[in-house]
Amino acid sequence: MIAIINAELVMKDHLIPEAVLFIEDGKIAGFGEMRTTPVSEGCEVLDAKGAYVGPGLVDIHTHTGDCYKLWQDPIPAALYHLQRGTTTVLPASYPRMTKEEYLQMAENIRTAMAHPDGGAIGGMYLEGPYINPKYGSNRAANPWNNKPIIPEDYLPMIEACADLTRVWGLGPEQENVEDFIAAAHQANPEIRFAVTHSEATPQQIEALMPYGLCIGTHHTNATSTIVKYPECRGVCVDEAVNYNREIYAELICDSQGIHVDPYMLRLVRRIKGDDRIILVSDRSYADQPNPPGYEFVTDINFDKWGDIAGSKLTLDVACRNWMKHTGASLVDTFRVASYNPARAVGFADRGEIREGLRADLILVDHKMNVSAVFLAGVRKY
């Protein structure tokens, strides 16, 4: 048994100061204040020295780790995130991938999850292919642009990917998309669906919620602008995500507030509450220079047209930015970066400090600088 002593435990909605936490057989075996919780002589003791101990971060939407694409080289990419406190990662596809690449991704992820170094990989987040061609980076290169949604294309992808897929993103306004989502839901009723790169109406989004649509992909970023009538505001994707309590809002939180303006971050937090927000890194790779006026930006990628193309974030850095932009506490921040994403995609065995859950834990300071990482009870970093 491992005992982490002199810890500030970050619980789901409070702190336990000057605490001890026990790990046994890869799970959290107990915890409590040190003054009332004895440590037996047989324990391996780790002195946290006042560090905060919280649940490992859960990044449900990221494309790369360091220079590795998660769909192609999942193990080194996942280890890159693990070193920075992300103990569960969902490799995300790119909207412009071909059908053959989706099938190869499923094979790569399946192999990686069975590997001893693949313990942080929790499945897949498929961003596409059925999204609106008007939105997202590198959209002109998307082979699915204006291609009909037909069973000949999507049934092989469902067969290969459905059991591994935690989230499947799509544009609810696409013709015949309900046929696709019904088939994917039938293949795996546990798949969550996300409104992604879309200009759907609230009614089109709500029509797919019975199938499991419960996430708004990178909320307020690469979604439709508000439909404008003369001297009147309309409603679209962002309003539907804000309005529907059942839908989690993914947020990319970069240092300059470019993906999502800091005022918008605070507004969404007020509307959705801390229990319906998910921080994601949406880390991707691009080798294009920053466009004029953005030379100072260090944590965002741009495509060759000068559009935003994901981030250079890891989730620990996104957490730090979240605290800076919104004033959220450490407890609140762990909730949006661990508990909420875990629950949103169906992980009931992680995402909080609770007896019996998987001992995915990180030690951090008050600014979310990571000093130690435990995956299923084993210290990795």
Image (cartoon, rainbow, N blue to C red):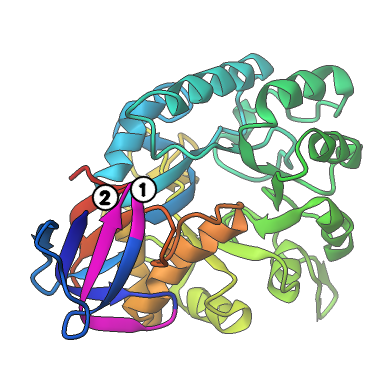
Q: Residue at x 38, y 67 (%)?
A: 353
- Which image quadrant for residue 257? bottom left
Residue 222 is situated, as x and y percent measured from the top left of the image, at 61, 52
Kind of residue at disc 2: Phe
Q: Is residue 297 visible?
A: no
Q: In which quadrant will I find the C terminus?
A: top left
Q: Nearer the viewer, residue 6 or 285?
A: 6
Which residue corresponds to the image point at 72% horizontal and 68% vertical from the top-left? 246
Foreground label between 2 and 1? 2
Left-right relation of 85 to 127: left
Kindly report the secondary structure that dominates the magenta region of the rendered protein.
Answer: strand
Disc 2 packing (10 Å; few <14; some 14–19; many ≥20) = many
Image x and y of residue 207, in percent: 89, 57
Location of residue 50 by image quarter: bottom left
Q: What residue is disc 1 on?
A: 87
- Of 325 and 278, nearer the camera is 278
* Residue named by callout 2: 374
Identified by mark 1, the residue type is: Thr
Highlighted range, magenta: 13-28
In the picture, the quarter occupied by the N terminus is: bottom left
Q: Which residue extends farthest front?
A: 41
Q: Is residue 301 left or right of residue 126?
A: left
Q: CA distance from mark 2 to mark 1?
A: 8 Å
Question: Percent from the top left, x then y, of residue 67?
Answer: 31, 30
In the image, residue 107 lies in the stretch drawn in magenta: no
- How many numbered marks appear? 2
Q: Secondary structure at mark 1?
A: strand
Q: Nearer the viewer, residue 295 or 155?
A: 155
Compare residues 180 and 223 and report the one nearer the observer.
180
Q: Are marks 2 and 1 in contact (CB under 8 Å)?
A: yes
Q: Magenta stretch: residue 20 in it?
A: yes
